[in-house]
Amino acid sequence: MSPLSSSFYLTCVFLSLHSVSAISIFLVSLAIFGTSVHGKEELRNNENHNNDTHPTTEDHHLLRIQMHKVPDAEMINRFLIKERNALLQLQSHTPNHTLLSQERKLLRGNIAQQSSLYEGRDESEIIKDYSNAQYYGVVKIGTPPQEFQVIYDTGSSNLWVPEVGCVHCGYKFIHGGKNKYDASLSETFMEDGSEFSIQYGSGAVSGKFEKDTVTLAQDINVENQMFATIHDAGGMGIGYAFGYFDGILGLGFDSISVGGVKTVFHNAMEQGKLEKPVFAFYLGDNADGELTFGGYDATKFEGELTWVKLSEATYWRIDLDGVKIGSFSTGSTDAIVDSGTSLITGPTEDIRKIANEIGATPTITGQYTIDCDLVEDLPEITWMIDGKEYVVPGKDLVLQTAGMCIFAMMGMDFPAPGPQWILGDVFMRKYYTVFDYENEQIGFAKAL
């Protein structure tokens, strides 16, 4: 891709997702909720790195879109609702579709070979519960642009939003309802009509593919982008209805895209809309987050980026030398780096041992609680990646509010060739993370 004469260096800022608790939603609705646009600020990119294959950019003006971040209390509210629902399901002996889906333990299904667990049709599957996602930002579709709040997700590769007439797609009395795409209002809409269906751990969505212009940040227009308009999101459940996000924008590779469609980021590169085939996440610690396209912001981290080659370009998957906390340690393993997951997940038996190590107590949902008095003394956890240690303090492995503490690690098992670990927002808040699409590598540096 040839660089443009005037470079583009763009940022989308994230909001932390709200609770599925109706009480919390009501309370949040009483607060002022809005955005403010800050002036452009000059940024620089660090040009000194520890290998020869890294993106570099010159100084740029970065457009910031400032949004609010919801506190960890909202995440704990979600946990409490899940626990309550699990208890009710046990009492009623009603099968839990989410648990059934997790029982299958497939990170990404093969469209041609695998069928839906409880619908009997071919579709793609991702074991992911977006009620656990903590950040989202704006994307615009159509001409004139229609605005949507989406989860920017490195753990999937499709863009989808609800369409006008969508069923099970939110309610007007909850946040004013979902933003819904209206093809009749867009001058650049092109009909496709082929079927789209994807099965998440949290439920299914179905609809059809269409084409339109997708706008990132303020004015990067990705033309003729294939995306899905959803007519039924019932499988996503109450978490979607009460959540602030309208849809998902996947930042994985084309190889795991439903229908094999090119991702928004891939098309943006091919159309020459970005100076470099790079995007980067800064997830503020108790602050707002930021996604930057076309480069990265070296003012957001200390030292130099350390680059790690991907083990495969499907998800953003890397090899790990091992994981250790206290007296527990693993041998060589692997992980995906996933902006759409707030927690750290690992093999169920490993997480059980780690929980025992720190004195955490299991719950019916598969998550763990811990005595808040122990938080300050929790041991740090270390991920060994390509010979370097990446440390997260023990206290940062806990979501804490109102005297309740949730351990932010959860067991989940995937059969081969699935990954063993998922490094979600808990990890990414500590380490500024740069995703280099062209060189198939990830850069890490300690976030400021």
Image (cartoon, helix red, strand yellow):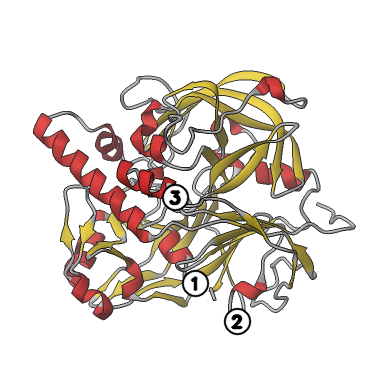
Callout 2 secondary element? loop
Q: Earlier in the sequence, mark 3 or mark 2?
A: 3
User: Of tags 3 and 2, which is closer to the observer?
Assistant: 3
Question: Residue flagged by tag 2: what amino acid is it?
Answer: Gly
Instruction: Estimate the spatial distance between the alpha carbons at disc 1 and disc 2, rounded to whole Å.
Output: 18 Å
Label 1 packing within 10 angstroms: few (<14), some (14-19), many (20+): some
User: What is the x, y in percent for residue 290?
Assistant: 59, 60
Residue wearing tag 2: 303
Instruction: Estimate the spatial distance between the alpha carbons at disc 1 and disc 3, rounded to whole Å.
Output: 33 Å
Residue 160, located in which quarter of the rendered image? top right
Residue at left offset 24%, top offset 49% = 80
In the depicted view, which residue is nearer to us: 286 or 124? 286
Residue wearing tag 3: 17
Q: Earlier in the sequence, mark 1 or mark 2?
A: 2
Q: Is residue 295 left or right of residue 173?
A: right
Q: Earlier in the sequence, mark 1 or mark 3?
A: 3
The disc placed on residue 359 is: none
In the depicted view, which residue is nearer to us: 221 or 128? 221
Kindly indicate whether the residue at mark 3 contacts the one at mark 1 (C-beta within 8 angstroms).
Answer: no
Residue wearing tag 1: 386
